[in-house]
Every structure is written in C-alpha cells, then in structure tokens.
C-alpha cells in the first residue's frame, strides 16, 4: 500500500486584511481535509476564487493554516525549523514562467533552486543535465531564457524544480498563459514525470480538459471540496458542477443530453473514441 506524501487535516485559512475581523466572512479554505498518495497524479479543478491556489500554497508552507494541520512527508508545515526540508520534498511551479526565470542562461536558471537548498556544486551539474533531459530542453541549456517560447520557459521552470529532486511537484495553473502548443508541451512533460519517474504531481487548473487523464480529480468551490474521485465518476455529476460554475467534457455533455431524451447511456466515457463506442453499442443493441 502506498503512503501519503501530503495530509491535510481540517484546514481553514482566511486572507488577512486591514479591516476589523468579520466572523461571518467566508474563509478562503473552509475545514478542508484530504490525503495525497505518493506517486499519484491529482488534478484540482475550480473556478477563480474557489480556493484551489490557496490550497496549493499550503502544500509547501508558502501559506500556513489558521486552524488545522498540513503534513508533508510526515512533517508539520507549521514547524518553521522544517520549512527547508518541506520545500525539498514539494516543489512549486506557478502560472507565469517569466516570473520564475532568474538567470541569463538556461542551465544557470535550472541550477538556482538546487544551489539555494545547499546541494554541492559538483552534484548540481549532474542534476541540471538530468533535469533538462527529462523535460526535453537539454539542447537549449546554453540559450538565453528570454528567447524561448512560453511552453519552453515553463519546461525550464519545471526542470529547476526537478533539479531539487522533490518527491512531489505542485503546478499552479502552469498553462494559463500558454498557447495550445505550449500547453501540450507542459502537460506531456508532467505526465511523463509522473508515469516514468514516479513523481507525485498535483495540477491546479481551471481547464477541465487538463484533468481527464488524472488518477484523481478534486473539485473545489467556495473554499470547500465538493467532489473527489476518478475523473470519469466526478464528471457524471453534471448539475452539481454546473451549479459551481464549471462545465463537463463535451463527450459527457452529449451523453447527458441523450440521457435526458430517454436514451439509457452511461456518462463515464470521456474520450471521443469511448463516447462514440458507447453510442454505437447502444444503437446496435436497439437494432438487434
């Protein structure tokens, strides 16, 4: 049985303001509890303001709970003496790659995080080369980052996290500022890191299409978790997701409309091929 890399227990968090505290004010996170299994690919989906990015920032102690607990690899994020070790375990990638580029040469940028956590210089060279190869950017190692495309910059940012060798990578809307090609590059990279190298991936997104291939999908709304399970199961809750301001895949929409017209069809077929096969099977049975 796999162990949990992250455990969240009754987490509540409110953003601080200069205004007097209002007991009726909604919490950004409201009594959240969940576990993230080591080696899994978890997608967290929600509209803007749902709390998903706030939750992500608790996973490596950027934010700390007002109440409740967050444990990373068994370590309490509220213990400041453990912050560095926690950030060795969980790396963060944010949505704007330009904000994460700190050096004038790609390989220097990738080395930056490893240097900051005290990795010996002779080991950093090996880690940088390995990380750039993993994200398909080794041939660009001597390039200037500002000449790269958005997708390439984001892959360099991911390489910088990989060079720190975390057990888990949290990506907070990493494709939000990318074109379709860049989005595809980044998504292919993180899926490969998860499947081929066993790195736990937590993908925060508001793009429903990016969550379909996840092992697990968590839906957030107004600081709470409203659905949690396999994507195919979560997306069967069409009306609840609509009420939270979210859509479902087009394949699910089609099957849902056919069900409302009286056709008895399952809603779990997410890919176009699965959807087509489901409809074909239904029609074949009717003809038979």
Image (cartoon, rainbow, N blue to C red):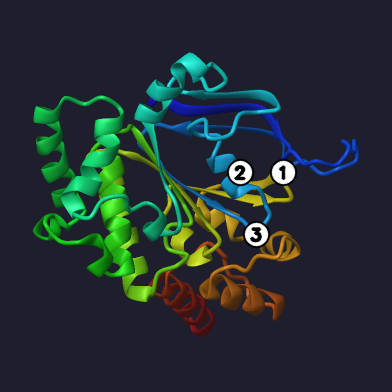
Judging by the rendered image, the residue that carries numbered circle 2 is 54
Counting residues from the start of the chain, the first of labels 1 and 2 encountered is 1
- Bin the neighbour count of mark 1 within 10 Å (Cα to Cα): few under 14, some 14-19, many 20 and up: many
Q: Are marks 3 and 1 in contact (CB under 8 Å)?
A: no
Q: CA distance from mark 2 to mark 3?
A: 11 Å
Q: Residues within 10 Å of mark 2 (few under 14, many from 20)?
A: some
Identify the residue position indicated by label 1 in the image: 28
Write the residue at 53% across / 16% down: 79
Q: Find residue 93 and report its horizontal and vertical position in percent.
A: 40, 48
Of 37 and 19, the residue lying toward us: 19
Where is residue 141? Give x, y as percent: 13, 55
Q: Can you tell which quarter of the image residue 55 is in?
A: top right
Residue 110 seen in render = yes
Mark 2 and mark 3 residues within 8 Å of each other at the beta carbon? no
Report the Cα–Cα distance between label 3 and label 1. 11 Å
Q: Which residue is mark 3?
A: 48
Q: Is residue 205 left or right of residue 146?
A: right
The image's mark for residue 281 is none
Q: Is residue 9 left or right of residue 192?
A: right
Sequence-earlier tag: 3 or 1: 1
Q: Are marks 1 and 2 in contact (CB under 8 Å)?
A: yes
Q: SS class of the residue under badge 3? A: loop
- Look at the image and tell me whether residue 196 can be seen: no
């Amino acid at each position: 049985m796999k162990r949990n890399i992250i455990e969240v227990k009754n987490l509540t968090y409110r953003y601080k303001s200069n205004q007097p505290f209002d007991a009726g004010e909604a919490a950004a996170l409201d009594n959240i509890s969940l576990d993230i299994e080591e080696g899994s690919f978890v997608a967290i989906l929600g509209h803007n303001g749902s709390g998903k990015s706030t939750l992500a920032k608790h996973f490596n102690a950027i934010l700390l709970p007002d109440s409740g607990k967050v444990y990373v690899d068994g370590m309490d994020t509220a213990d400041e003496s453990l912050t560095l070790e926690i950030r060795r375990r969980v790396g963060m990638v944010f949505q704007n790659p330009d904000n994460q580029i700190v050096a004038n040469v790609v390989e220097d940028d990738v080395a930056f995080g490893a240097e900051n956590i005290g990795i010996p210089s002779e080991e950093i060279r090996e880690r940088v080369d390995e990380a750039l190869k993993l994200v398909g950017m080794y041939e660009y190692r001597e390039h200037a980052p500002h000449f790269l495309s958005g997708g390439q910059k984001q892959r360099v940012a991911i390489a910088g996290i990989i060079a720190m060798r975390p057990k888990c990578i949290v990506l907070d809307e990493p494709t939000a500022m990318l074109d379709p090609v860049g989005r595809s590059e980044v998504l292919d990279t993180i899926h490969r890191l998860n499947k081929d190298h066993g790195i736990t991936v937590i993908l925060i997104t508001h793009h429903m299409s990016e969550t379909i291939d996840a092992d697990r999908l968590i839906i957030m709304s107004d600081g709470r978790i409203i659905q949690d399970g396999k994507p195919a199961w979560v997306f069967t809750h069409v009306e609840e997701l609509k009420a939270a301001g979210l859509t479902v895949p087009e394949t699910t929409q089609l099957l849902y409309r056919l069900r409302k017209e009286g056709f008895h069809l399952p809603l779990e077929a997410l890919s176009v091929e699965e959807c087509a096969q489901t409809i074909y099977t239904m029609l074949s049975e009717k003809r038979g």
